Image (cartoon, rainbow, N blue to C red):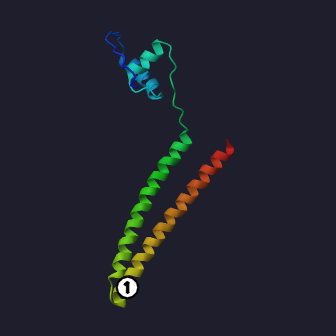
Amino acid sequence: MKEKRQVRNKWLTIRLSEEEEKILSGFKGKTTSGSLSEYARKILLREPVTVIYRNQVADDFLQEMIHLKTELNAIGKNFNQVVHKLHSLDSLSQVLPWIALNESSKRAFFEKLEEVSDKMDKIYRLWLQK
C-alpha cells in the first residue's frame, strides 16, 4: 500500500545572511537530506539527521583510479585499432611501421599499469597505518 503524502501547507519564513545560508547549506551538504527545507525541518523538529561520513583518502584514491581507468581505456582502444590494421597489412614493409607503433602503445600501457600498481601500494600502506 502506498504511503499517503503529507501535505505541508504552512510556511515558516526565516531570513539569513549570505554567510549564514552558506554555512547552513554546508551542513546540509554533509547529510542525506535532499533539500535545505528537509534538513531545516529535521533540525527544528529534533528528528535524526543522517550525516554522510567521507573518507578523504579513499575519495582521492577513487578519483585517481577513475582518471587512470579512462587513460587505460583509451590505450586499449588504440591498441585494438592497431591490431585491426595489422590484420589488413599485406607486406613486410607495411608491418615494420606497425611494430614501431605497437611498441610505443605497449610501453604506454605498461607505464599506466605500473602507475596503477604504485597507487594501489600507496593506498594499501595508508590503510595499514589505521
Residue toward you, 120 or 87: 87
- Is 100 in front, or is 49? 49
Measured along the vertical axis of the image, is residue 15 above or below residue 111? above
The quadrant in which residue 81 appears is bottom left
Q: On the image, numbered disc 1 is attached to which residue? A: 95
**Left or right, residue 6 beside residue 65:** left
| Residue 125 or residue 36, whichever sits in front | 36
Q: From the viewer's perspective, tell me whether residue 125 is left or right of residue 110.
A: right
Instruction: Please determine whether, in this image, residue 55 is positioned above or below residue 88.
Output: above
The picture places residue 118, in percent across and down from the top left corner, at 58, 57
Which x, y percent locates residue 76?
42, 66
Amino acid tagged 1: Val
The answer to whether 52 is drawn above or below residue 129 in the figure is above
Q: Quadrant of the C terminus?
A: top right
In percent of the image, x 34 and y 90: which residue is there?
91
Residue at x 51%, y 26% (from the top left corner)? 50
In the rendering, at what x and y percent does residue 89 appear?
33, 84
| Residue farthest to the front, as pictured | 1
